[in-house]
Amino acid sequence: MSSAVAMPTPAVQESPARAPATETGSVPIVPGSGWSRSANVAPGTILELAGPGVHVPAVLEGLRGRDDAPIVVRRASGAPSAPFVVGGETGLLLRDCEHVVVEEIAFIGATRCGIRIENCRSIAVRNVLVARLGPDADADGFEIVDSTGIDLRTVRFDGWQDAGLELRGAREIRGGDLQFTPLVRHRNLTAIRVGADCRDVRFSEFTTRAIPTAVEIGIAADLPHTPDTPEASEPADSLGDGATAPSSGTADRPVASTSPPRAIVLERALLDRPDVALRLLDAVEVDLRRLTIVDSKVVFEIDAKGLEAARFADNLVVWNPGAMRAFAEVVRGDEGLELGGNLWWSAELPAARPLLGDLPGRAATPQRFSPDPRVAPRGHPTAPEAEGFGRPAPERP
């Protein structure tokens, strides 16, 4: 009687899990398709959004380009118009990325934020529109949070709720050719807000039109402040070689910071018809120069316990009779503001000067109240006697 011999069952060989292929070259993104990325994108890759068409919002996280080979997100070559990224809570979220360029895209109708840059290094945004933000009451056009080395060029902000451009924990920020325009049914409260733990921020050649507060710099005087020491001015997560480790904060639970902003420069700009042109809170080393301020109801609003080394010089302030309510509304702390040479002019002067109150701060240079500078639409004076004040005239080719 024979018996069957049981043969051993061969072990099943499992294929090792394959990592997602790394994208290289030009990667086409068709309208309506998901284009979020989490690493696995090689330096020099171009994500091309085809247009015309509507694209969905995206999150780009952990992308690592190089200085000589950035990762680029842009309109597809040869597309007849810019692609539109429409809706979502945030149109584009860049988190923990470095050496990324975003250009020639419109971000429309996000409920909370058009573009948010969070825990990033070396990001450039160029030729971009952010518009129709809300209805969230805190909706911002653009947020830069806990990030270093951000460059904004030719960005238009059309209709938001809280701030067109909001900075917190932002270091080495540069911006030029920024335009802030209100839309109806949007609050458009503030054009530029530079808040806690910001360092080395410079914006030039920008324009705000009919925004309630054109510029706000500082943190509230009643907040408990982090001591403003050289150590405190360094990024909390610095690795010591110029890099910055990802912050432990998130969009829902940001890292708290109460260090006042330092080394903020605004220059060569037009602030047209704001309610308040410049709102100054606790801040250190604020340089406001070559600004043209037109028909502001109040030029300065100041409430500070620690406004230090702020300077307002070479500026031009003009208004139509009856347009200005006061030179300044000061709750406290204007002794940290120094006035260099500035030109203030209106046809209602000198009769209206007693009605406008005192100029804020301390005048290091006598202020001028004539002549009529004859301001051009772009904000520069055309009267030869006013040369050197306000926004410079465009350079001739």
Image (cartoon, rainbow, N blue to C red):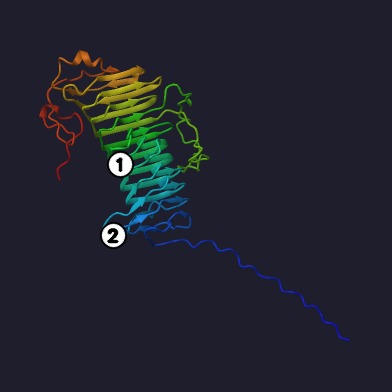
- In the rendered structure, which disc, 2 or 1, sits on the residue that comes first in sequence? 2
Q: Position of residue 395 (x, y in %)?
A: 17, 41
Residue situated in front as seen by the camera: 276 or 46: 276
> Viewer-proximal residue, 75 or 323?
323
Query: For the view shown, which residue lies furthest in the top direction?
Result: 354
Q: What's the residue type where badge 2 is placed?
A: Ala
Residue sitting farthest toward the right: 1
Q: Percent position (x, y) of residue 351?
A: 15, 14
Residue 79 in the figure: left or right of residue 316? right
> Which label belongs to residue 36?
none
Q: Position of residue 385 (x, y in %)?
A: 11, 26
Question: Label 1 amino acid?
Answer: Phe
List the residue tagged with mark 1: 157
**Image quadrant where one finds the N terminus:** bottom right
* Position of 129 relative to 29 (above/below): above
User: In the rendered image of this protein, does residue 390 appear above or below residue 97?
Assistant: above
Badge 2 marks a residue whose secondary structure is loop
Instruction: Name the residue carrying label 2.
Output: 79
The residue located at (61%, 68%) in the rendering is 15
CA gap between label 2 and label 1 equals 23 Å
* Badge 2 density bin: few <14, some 14–19, many ≥20, Cα 10 Å: few
Q: Return the x and y of residue 44 as percentages of the image width and height.
A: 39, 57
Quarter-wise, where is residue 83 in the image?
A: bottom left
- Horizontal placement of 256 versus 174: left or right? right
User: Which residue occupies the foreground of this view, 284 or 182?
Assistant: 182
Which type of secondary structure does the marked residue at label 1 adopt?
strand
